[in-house]
Amino acid sequence: MSETAILDRRTGTGSQSRPINTSAIEFRDVSIAFDDRVLLDRISFRVPYGGMKIIVGPSNCGKSTIIKMTIGLLKPDSGQIFLEGQEITSMPEEELLTLRNKVGMVMQSDALFSMSVAENLAYRLPQQGWTDEEIESEVHRVLQIVGLDQADDLMPDQLSGGMSRRTAVARALAGSPEIMLYDSPCSGLDPIISRRMMRETIRQRDIDNVSSIYVTQNLDEVRYLCSHLYETSPSGEPVLRQEDHAFCLTNTEVLMLSDGHIIFDGKDETFWDSVNEKIKQFLT
């Protein structure tokens, strides 16, 4: 699917054409410091439409900060950040709120509202024009994805840690946002649920053309996301394939941070074979 023929997630119809020279997300020479510590120093990267950028690196290197800056929750000290071609670093809060409606975000903390699981998932759909029937169907859909289809009436204090995490992921998925930001979404989840989550992330990327940033320190997640692809079968059903000699993913890249800088930004094959000492140490 080309950048100028993106499908609308709800209707299946063609949306407005996007300029070829813009990205879903772009950082240009972005820096931010906390007290006397420079956390990120003039970093630049882009996420093309339908692309996934997997961000890795040691603890406290700025991965979560990038997620927060992408939607304006944190402002950089210098540089520019663009979301769907719009510069957001100086954007008024009212305009930012409108833009955030296009973004699904899973934060490190679940930050669930004091309302039922179903209400958490549905909270922003009415303002996007969804009817009650559509909302009920969408809540059921995303709860099935995360394996919580019997938990819609539960309150946050009735959820286990894993259930709370899955609710936070489901809330981000609700409404099929055009951009997804994942901050360690599989943290604390068992392998079966984690794999289900990653398959949905891959399906969004390859079938729905969703653009995403995926933060993780789990190298198994990186390998899975970089080696699997969804294709549409002749019957119209999505089919999961594993990367082999016949094809190589081009819409997914790894970015590694260290000491405030980007030390790698490219395809995973090059990442695994890097001779950079910091990368080699991180991989072991």
Image (cartoon, rainbow, N blue to C red):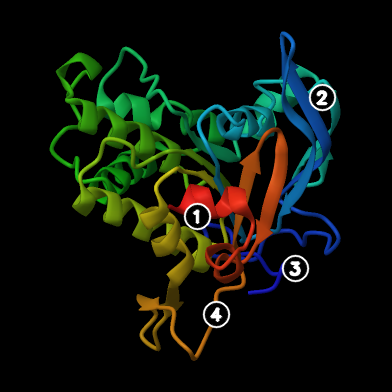
Query: In the rendered view, would you say 230 is above or below 56?
Result: below
Which secondary structure lies at badge 1? loop
Q: Percent from the top left, x then y, of residue 151?
A: 16, 33
Q: Looking at this rendering, what residue extends furthest in the front direction?
A: 277
Question: Does label 2 or label 1 sit earlier along the sequence?
Answer: 1
Callout 1 environment at 10 Å: few (<14), some (14 to 19), or many (20+)? few
At a point 52% along the width and 57% down the height, the residue shown is 9
At a point 48% along the width and 65% down the height, the residue shown is 226
Which secondary structure lies at badge 2? loop
Nearer the viewer's eye, disc 1 or disc 4?
Answer: 4
Query: In the rendered view, would you say 120 is above or below 51?
Result: above
Question: Does label 3 or label 2 sit earlier along the sequence?
Answer: 3
Q: Percent from the top left, x then y, of residue 232?
A: 43, 79
Image quadrant assignment for residue 254: bottom right
Question: Does label 3 or label 1 sit earlier along the sequence?
Answer: 3
Which secondary structure lies at badge 3? loop
**Residue assigned mark 4:** 248
Q: Amino acid at mark 4?
A: Cys
Nearer the viewer's eye, disc 2 or disc 1?
Answer: 2
Q: Amino acid at mark 3?
A: Thr
Callout 3 environment at 10 Å: few (<14), some (14 to 19), or many (20+)? some
Callout 2 environment at 10 Å: few (<14), some (14 to 19), or many (20+)? few
**Residue assigned mark 2:** 91
User: On residue 4, which mark appears?
Assistant: 3
Question: Does label 2 or label 4 sit earlier along the sequence?
Answer: 2
